[in-house]
Image: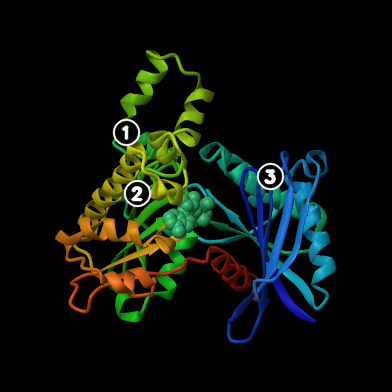
Amino acid sequence: MENSILVLNAGSSSLKFSVFNLLGADQLSQKVTGQVEGIGTAPHLKARNDHEQTLIDVHWQTSEVANHAQALQQIIDFLNSSLQHQRLVGVGHRVVHGGPDYSAPSLITPEVMAKLDTITPLAPLHNPHNLAAIRAMMQECPNLLQVACFDTAFHRQQDTVAKLFGLPYEYYERGVQRYGFHGLSYEYIASVLPPDIATGRVIVAHIGSGASLCAIHNGRSVASTMGFTALDGLLMGTRAGSLDAGVILYLLQQEGLSIKQLEDLLYKQSGLLGLSGISNDMRILLDSNEPRAQLAIDYFVYRVSREIGSLAAAMGGLDALVFTAGIGENSPKIRQLIAKQATWLGVDIDATANEKSVACISRANSRVSVWMLPTNEELMIAHHTRTLLGL
Ligand code: ADP
């Protein structure tokens, strides 16, 4: 029997999972990845092994997998039937918001769950799903140790000035701060940077359907484009990114939007989708001849480029730029457009290396080295879980 760790990443209608085998010398080997999508609408479980072979691909009626607990039950049934030589010894969960107190992963106890419940209002669209998966797992396997890994934790070491808003200070004390997200991705990228780069001033562009940038100096998060929530900063697939707070007042006071309508507008109808009127998927916009698809791409690149300047200022310079996540890993075109706008900072990419998507995509004499590094948040969670549980 081999010991393994299960990693769970719960979204609003999906439950992603990965199984890692524990090897010697702190090594982990990802054996299975999969997800239940369409929880409560069109449930669908699919999983593949480390040779990219499909292990399961099954659809259900809506009522058969109507919530996260039922999705987890299906995942556990699947794992029990397919992983006969592996024994689960711990579970690691992605928890998007850890509030002001969690600057490291935490063993899940009833006290920790009670505390995390108080943080839910800070991330109403994310944390309830993360906590639902933890509760379902506690119910299903009460003897299995579980660990919460927070997307905010990596950023908690930022200086106070980087976490402030210009509101009266008592709001900061009440937790209205810049937290920053995608921390597990940034931590992973920081851990795989070549040693001479890792000690420098690095901007990591995690650009997928959610998108943010992080300034990392000597392995430590210095500033991030995301703030109190995952709405701030860059334009995203369906999220607006930074907005003049006066726009919110205008929409509430003059256009009479309800809170729910406003939430939908900001989280689901804006971003690439809202600007283009076509799609939230960068691939579709890049293939389109519609002027508004081009406008959405132009604005996306413009926002990323402006924020690169801002984060370089926060670090007093820039030594390396890293692209990661769905767009960053897969779109040479977007990387090239962003790199061109960052020429003034000393960014000079090698067009051939960029097209080939190799790891280092800058020219030999580029003052700033430029990288394409695939992220792996699940591996980071498995690593933290193993370390915390002493496995
Ligand atoms: P998340 O984890 O935030 O859901 P991902 O990091 O998986 O998102 O990124 C998904 C997005 O990546 C897609 O919506 C799509 O816009 C973009 N993407 C994936 N492949 C490509 C590609 N070849 N070219 C451009 N964009 C791509």
Q: Residues within 10 Å of mark 3 (few under 14, many from 20)?
A: many
Q: Residue at x 59, y 44 (%)?
A: 127
Q: Tell me the quarter of the image containing the C terminus.
A: bottom right
Task: State which tag comes first along the sequence, 2 or 3.
Answer: 3
**Label 2 amino acid?**
Thr
Q: Which residue is mark 2?
A: 225
The percent coordinates of residue 92 (x first, y second) are 64, 62
Rendering quarter of residue 58: bottom right
Pick whichever of labels 2 and 1 is earlier in the sequence.
1
Residue at 62 percent across and 43 percent down: it is 12
Above or below 45: residue 347: below
Q: Are marks 3 and 1 in contact (CB under 8 Å)?
A: no
Residue on which the image places disc 1: 167
Residue type, numbered disc 1: Leu
The one of 294 and 343 positioned closer to us in this rendering? 294
Query: Which mark identifies residue 38?
Result: 3
The residue lying at 38 percent from left, 41 percent from top is: 232
Mark 3 vs mark 1: give the one in front: 3
Disc 1 is placed on an element classified as loop
Query: Quick one: quadrant of the N terminus?
Result: bottom right
Question: Residue 80, can we see it?
Answer: yes
Across and down, in percent, residue 321 comes to 30, 65
What colour scheme has been applied to the protein in the rendered image?
A: rainbow
